[in-house]
Image: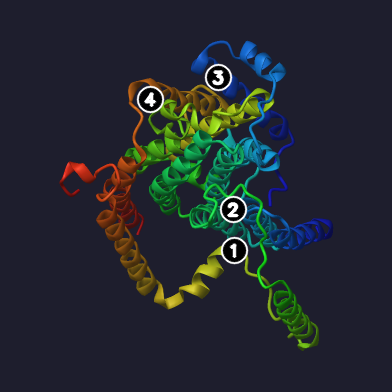
Amino acid sequence: MDVAFWVLAVVAAAAGVAVFVVDSMARATFALLASLLAVGGIFLLLDLHYLGVLIVLMMVMEMLVMAVFMIMYMMNPAGLMPMTMVHNHRGAIVIAGAVFVLLAAGALLTPWPHRRGAPPADPTHALGLSIMGPKMLVMMVIGVAILATMIATVVLATHRGRYDADRGHGS
Amino acid sequence: MADDTPLWTLAAYPVVLGAFVLATAAFDGGSPLPRLARLLVGQRRRTLLPDVLLMRIGAISLLTAAVLAGAVLPLGEVALLDLDVGVVWFNAMEVCAWGALWLTGWSANSVYPLVGGYRFVSQGLAYELPHMFALITVAVGAGSLRVADAVQAQQGLWFVVWMPVAFVVYLVSALAMAFWGPMSQPLGPDIAGGVTAELAGADRLVFQAGRYALLVVAAGAAVPLFLGGGAGPLLPAWGWVAVKTAAVLGVLLWARHRFPAIRMDRFMQVSWVVLIPLVLVQLLVVSIVVM
């Protein structure tokens, strides 16, 4: 268990560093994905199965969409030409170092509270209740409204596809 | 996690999966062993300035994702990995195919594989939402995210009987997930084989094995999710799982020659305008029945 935690922690940190070291947009994206997957693995170790698997699920989809957009808007469209992943190198080092010191000092100096109670038998159920709780109905209605908005947006957008312009009618 | 998983599942799972993959390969293009041998000794093709590391990761992670996704499916009574969030795990692992395909297509530094890789991402965006709602329908019907609980909940009535829409949507998305038959545009002949255009030798072998494994796992998941798992007369549970998996796989293999390839922008529209509303109505019906 401890070994697995340290392996995942080292992978997460090393892959995070790799994001700024590699010279390709695709490698940077997938290094970031590797880092986030390791974090998902740490959640699995904590017995937070639902959150851990959800991190894997969401991050894979998210990184793919991000890779598509990043490479689409870059100067070399396929993204295979070597390029540097950092801008304002010196300033970035100073800012990142200062933020790291601040966070590390906070983590070490905060008087952390002692644990009260025991973990719930079903963390997924407890998580759902603590996020939604008595507002379950509101959350569900808002969820459906957001989805309806998404579908409407796509419906409005799709019939302008580049191959359908000459068909001359809407969906 | 699963401390009481019997050891034999660890040995049985790869054997069963391998047998199904070989059978699929045989149905797909004749005797698989000569093809396997030819790919094993074949030369790898080198394009100009490829990203070899990412290409290898892409081909290998397709197979890895399929194997990990199948690990939560029960071989009869028990699964190799009896996770309490098995349905979400299955979904998370199969989504890794997005990354695998895009990486394989992108890293060759060649036009047609790149186009194929992008086609798969747009296909993924179209099939994933209906697919997720179909899985959620099963989870709501079972009142649990554990695959074994879904099987348990079907003892009286199989989910396919009162969730037919979710089942059909699942089958369509299973085709898309394994980019098979009508959903094989990422590997389209119009772009010289797309993602696989520059794959040769061992790389192609690993990629093809991953694709067949994904198809087998997608067919196999329909059994515990919709078809009552190992329930059935005479045969033992694992026998029924095998028979039902073969039946679903047969439907998917048949669909390959029965339906033409679907253009992705058209499928995108059908997916959002037809499939998502339909499966949402199905979800509503199931929610009301369960309440």
Give whichever of B23, B98 is nearer the camera.
B98
Judge left or right: residue B291 versus residue B191: left
Q: CA distance from mark 2 to mark 3?
A: 33 Å
Vertical side of B208 occupied by A62: above or below: below
Please state which of residues B211 and B264 is positioned toward the viewer in this rendering.
B264
* Marked residue nearer the N-terminal end (2 or 3): 3
Q: Nearer the viewer, mark 2 or mark 4?
A: 4
Look at the image and tell me whether residue B158 can be seen.
no
Amino acid type for the residue under numbered disc 1: Asp
Residue at point 55% right, 24% down? B239
The answer to whether mark 1 and mark 4 are in CB contact below 8 A is no
Do tags 2 and 4 sit on the same chain? yes
Tag 3, which secondary structure?
A: helix
Do labels 2 and 1 touch, CB within 8 Å? yes
Amino acid found under the numbered disc labelled 4: Ala
Mark 1–mark 4 distance (CA, rounded to whole Å): 41 Å
Q: Are marks 1 and 4 on the same chain?
A: no
**Local crowd at mark 2 within 10 Å, few (<14), some, or many (≥20)?**
many
Q: Which residue is mark 4?
A: B255
Q: Residue B6 location, x and y as percent?
A: 71, 38
Q: Find residue B25 and report its horizontal and vertical position in percent.
A: 55, 19
Q: Quadrant of residue A145?
A: bottom left
Among numbered discs 4 and 3, the one appearing first in the sequence: 3
Q: Which of these two is toward me, A38 or A131?
A: A38
Please name the residue that numbered disc 2 is placed on.
B84
Toward which corner of the image does residue B197 lie, by quadrant? top right
- Please tell me whether mark 4 sits on a helix, a strand or a loop: helix
The residue to which callout 3 is attached is B25
Instruction: Give the residue number, with chain letter if any, for mark 1.
Output: A122
